[in-house]
Structures are given as C-alpha cells and as structure tokens.
Amino acid sequence: MAAALCLLPASVGAKAFDWYRGGHVTYDLQKKHDAVVEKAIDLFGSDMQAVTGKSIRQASNADVEIFQLNTASNKELKAMESLKVPLMQFITKKDAFWLGVRGGKIIIAGSNGCGTAYGLLELSRMAGVSPWVWWGDVKPAQRNRLTIDDKFEVLRAPSVALRGINLEQTAWKVSDYRQLFQLMLRLRANVVSAGWDGGQSTLPDNKVFKAMADSFGIKMAMPHDGNALRMREHKKNISVDITLHDDGYGYLMPTDNALDNGGGLIYHLSFAGQPHDNLWLPTTQPGLVVNELQTAFYRGANRLWLVSINNPKPLAYPLSLAMDLAWNINSVGSTNVANHLKTWLEEQFGKPVADRLAKPMNDFIRLTTIRRPDMMDFSKQTTPTKANPSGDGGVKNTEFNAEEFGNELERYINDYHAVSQSVDKAAELVDDRLRDAYFAAVQYPVKASMLMAVKQLQAQEARLIGRPVSFHHDDEALESAVRSMKAYSALQQLNRYYTDSLAGGKWKGKVDLTPRGLALYAQPLLPDTISEKEISKYGNGGPIDAPLEDDGCIIRQGYEYASGSKGATEVSLLGRSLRAVTLQQGDSLVYEFQTGTFGGVLRLAFVPLFSLDGGSSQCSIQIDNQPATTIIINDGSQSERWVNGVLRGQSLINLPVALKQGRHTLTVKALNDHVAIDQWMIDRYVNRHFYVFPVK
C-alpha cells in the first residue's frame, strides 16, 4: 500500500482524517460559478485520475465541497456560515481562498472564481501533483490513501493582485497557449502578455483565443503608452504603470516614474538583446530573483508583476519561485532561498533525491554565476544588421587563465564534472516515472553547461598552445582540441535526445536548444580540423589536476566580516560566494586581516545592482584610518561598466593599496540603497590576468 499523505503537521489534539481511501473522489459544487472553476475541476479530475487511478464524481454528500463566494446564493452563504468558514476574513479579497476540514469533509471556498480554482488546485498540490505535471513531465505517484489533519484549515490571498507572464521570441499555436493557461492556473498567474520588449503585442487577436483566456481567469495585457500595460477587467479597460523594470538580466533598474503603491514590474528570466542573449538555459540566480522582486514589492511595484520568459519548459524552478513570491511575498526569506530550491526539488522528485541534490545544485548555481553558459563565447552582441540579424559577436578567448591560481581553467571544468557526476548519482534514486522530468530539470542544464564550458575552454587552450603550422604535431594542443570536439559532439547528442526522444518526442519543435543560431552553439573554433585518427589517439585523457592555490593573496567572501550594521543582510544563493551581503544607504561592514609589508591592488567584487534612486551605485572604501575612497559599482545601462557586470556576474573594482606589517581593517560603506558585496582580494600583482577569485 502507498504511504499516507499528511498535508501539514497535526494541530494540537488533531487526528488523521482520510479524505480518500479507495473508490472515487467525490465533489459537490454550488450551482452558480465561473468558467475558471470548471477548468480547475477538469484539472483536479485528471490529477485524481493520476493519483488514485479513478475518475472523480459529483455527488450531494461529497468528500470535497466547493463554494464561490461572489456568486453564492443566500442558502449557500448560510451553509458556509454553519460550517464556520471565516467568510469575513477573505470575502472582499480578490483571488483569495479558504481550505479546511469541517464535519468529515474538505471545504473549499474562494472569494471569486479564480480564488475558488486556486483552492481546488491547492488540494491537488497537497495530494502530490506538481503544477508542472504537463510542462515538466512530473507524473504523480499513485496512492491508496490521502490523509489530512482533521483540524486543518488555511486562508490564502495574493500579495500582488496581477501576476503575469510575458512571452518573448515565441511563435505558438493556440494549443500551446491552452497548455500555458493550464500551467498559469496552477501557478496562480492571471495575466498574459506577449511582445512587451518589442512594444507591440504578439498575442493572437481573435474571439476564440480571448474566450479561452477568459475561461482560465486570465486577463490579456497589451503594451500601452510606452511604459504601461492595458487589460480588460470586468468589461472595463484598466491600465497599470510600469514603475520598475530590470535591465533584461535580472538586475532591477531605476525609472523616471514615481515609486508609489499600485505600480507594476517587468522582470526578465530570459532575454534576447545586448550585450548578449540569455535564451538557452535558466541561470538567473535564485537569490537575485528573491532580492530584486522583494525590493520591487516594497518600493511600490505591488499591483502587477510581469515575468518575461521565452518558454516555460526550461524555466520551471525560477518561474515557480517568481510566482510563489507574487502570491506570498514572504514565502521566501533572504537566508532561506536554498531551502526553497530544495523544497521545490522535493516536491518534484521526493526527499531522498532533493537531499542528494542540495549541494551539487548550489555548486551549479555558483558555476553558472561565474559565467552563464549562454555567454561562454565571451563576446558581445552588437546592433543587428541584415547580414547579422542577431548581432552575433562570434567566439573570443575567455578570461580564464590556465597559468593562474593552480590552473583556474581546468579547476572550473573539474568542478563542473563533479557536479555532473553528483546529479547522475542522484538519478539512481529517481523513480522511473520521473526520469524524463529529472533529465529536463536537472541533468540537461547541468550537463549542457558543463559541455559548453569544456568545448569553449579547451578550444581556447588548443588555440593558445598550438599554431596552424605545428598544430598536428603538438600533443598538448591536440589533447585540448579533442576534448573540445568530444564535448561538442556530446552536447549535440544531448540536444537530440531532448528534442527527439524525451517524453516520447513530446518536445520536438517546442524547445530551441540553439536559440538564434549563435556561433556559441557551433563547432569549436580550433587551429585546424582534427581527424578521426587524432580523436581516437588523443580522446582518452582524463581530468587535469588543478589544486587551488591563492599565490599569497588575502581573500575574503563578503559574508566573512568582523562587524556590520544592523541592516546588513546575507542573501542565500546570491553572488559567486552564494552568500552576498546586501547593504542599504549608510550600512557598513568591517573586515579584519593581517599582512606583512605589502603593495599591490585591492580587488572588490559586488553583485552588479543599480542604485534605484537614480545616479550610479557607490560605496566608500577605507583601510585602517586612511582617507576613504569612493568607488562606482554600477551606472546606467548600456555603459561599459554595466556590460562587464552583466557578462561577468560581478562588478569588479581595483584600487591601489600599500600596507605595513600588522593587523588591518577594511571598511565598506554603502552610499546608496541596494548594494551587495560578494568578495574581495588583496593581490601583490597589479596586472594579474585571471577570472575567478581563488576561494573554495
């Protein structure tokens, strides 16, 4: 028999109540209700079919009773009152729901149609059905028994009234939108837009499509007057000003609009444009998503959130995170972002798998923050032309240096291999019904990122070591070239499996694993073509040992401070340190260190956040009692400083330093709100060429 499902820890004096133990799950629904409730019942029915193996049935004496307050009759309102449903606590709140146990039944009451639908689909979640059941191929486990605390009750209402998804770079059929709307209903999203970045809606403009959106409780939003969205609500046009938006890469930007209550936010999880497309893999840091969305909310962008994506399929976790925050802004705290990720993995794949994935997925986030796999070509896209419509900048040499810190290039590759091996090991615990889901959500992004890094970095090594005239006689250059080519071939094979075989070919033509055909995805750039004979001869080399060496540098993670202001906040899964510290204006951190007589450079690394009040983001830096120096972390978008921060995932500032022997202090003080320090290092070699601070 399958294990019982307990929804929440039992209340004092509570007992387990079986709301399903064989037979058919039954429900009763008030007579007058919105179309979105019917959609939710259809989804709930398919969920219960998957979980129990049997269809749901409507009955008068049902396991689940469903009410919609704004269309309820007096008799139905009195029935809810007799069941002690706390109507007055949520009757005026849009999209709210109450779910609880009364008289041996589960009662669901929504303030309106959407709230009622959300309440019913909450029960699906509690029965083990992921919102990503279709898009993520997450098949629920069959159960013989579903149990709930007999005193269970919960009341939920959204933090953000309008919670939307904006689609960019998509060309979908109506059937694709139907699946999107089902996902949105499960994620409690109620606005859809397409084409915001282009300034013109690309949503289908016909009555059938509009009726379908309406049946799912979803409003269609159109760009309006340059910096607003317009949508239909209760047969009226409403417009929401966009008071805040990001730069396309997840970093919140200042706007000229007033920051007051009732504003809107546009936030990108994928983006096509300069300085580089970010359309392939979802690598915006979870800590950044949380920090920026919560910042936007508390600065007044609390009426509408529009999360811009290319395709939900690869964005399951970050989109879930954004929608969880839109629904409950306090659902994730600054210090427990990693816990939220682990909980999400547990919901998809079970606790044993989530426990095994906790460390490797954190390591993966660190590696993709060092360099997003979409940007591993180390080039910048330029203004599109007819001959080069994407503005492709080609492939350049990276900043990784095999000669520094014990070979940072090979160590980066080795770290990726270790993560890949860990997720493959965790796959042994994955239930067969979840293999496809695990591949798409975990194995593909990890392995594809690793193979892209190997392809690009080893090709660079081959180019730097070998020369066209001597390449085919240079064993070391050939070894790197073959490693690069094998990684490219493995990535091609991985892509073919995803598009042609995964879930029986379900995603063929629906995912783009080489978006816009950039040179990044092409064969590696090598000194010359290598032969099959050379691949056979040099293709068996193992990893190159690259032990960490700091070369006498003094290095600290941002969170390793001796003392700090009360407002300093460590954010989980933010920065290369994965624990960057955010500061508001006037906050300071003091670090202590010891050194001999020393001359060189102080390198400071910040998360490239903007000052939201206009102007550049600045800090003051002071060593001991020396005069403080003001530094600029980030300035307006399109600046060279901003471009480098986006591509690197860090704003790096270098200052000359001269120290006497003894103990010293370094004080970092924020001169504006919205600052995050990640790492710093004192280095005796001013002109050192490297890419990663040598820290574990």
Image (tube, grey):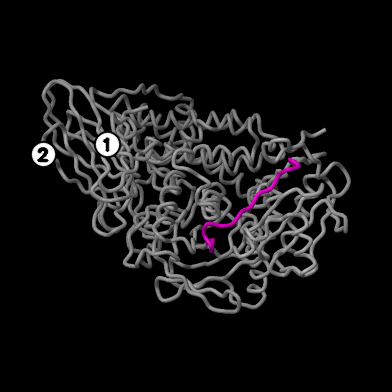
Dot 1 amino acid type: Leu
Using the image as rendered, state which of residue 177 and residue 33 is in the foreground: 33
* Coordinates of residue 378 in the picture (x, y in percent): 34, 46
Q: In this picture, which residue range is highlighted in magenta?
A: 149-165
Task: Give amino acid for label 2.
Answer: Pro
Residue that appears at 30% across and 42% down: 606
Residue identified by numbered label 2:
627
Question: Foreground residue, 140 or 491?
Answer: 140
Q: Position of residue 634 (x, y in %)?
A: 26, 51
Of the residues under marks 2 and 1, which one precedes in the sequence? 1
Task: Please determine whether, in this image, residue 36 is positioned above or below residue 605.
Answer: below
Q: Residue at x 55, y 56 (%)?
A: 311
| In-image side of 317 versus 259 (left or right) | right
- Secondary structure of the residue carrying tag 2 is loop
* Residue 453's disc number: none
Q: Is residue 46 left or right of residue 438?
A: right
* Quarter occupied by residue 37: bottom right
Q: Which residue is under mark 1?
A: 589
Report whether residue 528 is seen: no
How many callouts does the rendering have?
2
Looking at the rendering, which quadrant does residue 120 occupy?
Answer: bottom right
Residue 414, position as x, y percentages in the image: 43, 28
x, y percentage for residue 370? 37, 39
Mark 2 touching mark 1, by CB under 8 A?
no
The local crowd at label 1, few if under 14, some if 14 to 19, many if 20 or more residues have their Cα within 10 Å, is many
- Front-lying residue, 81 or 248: 81
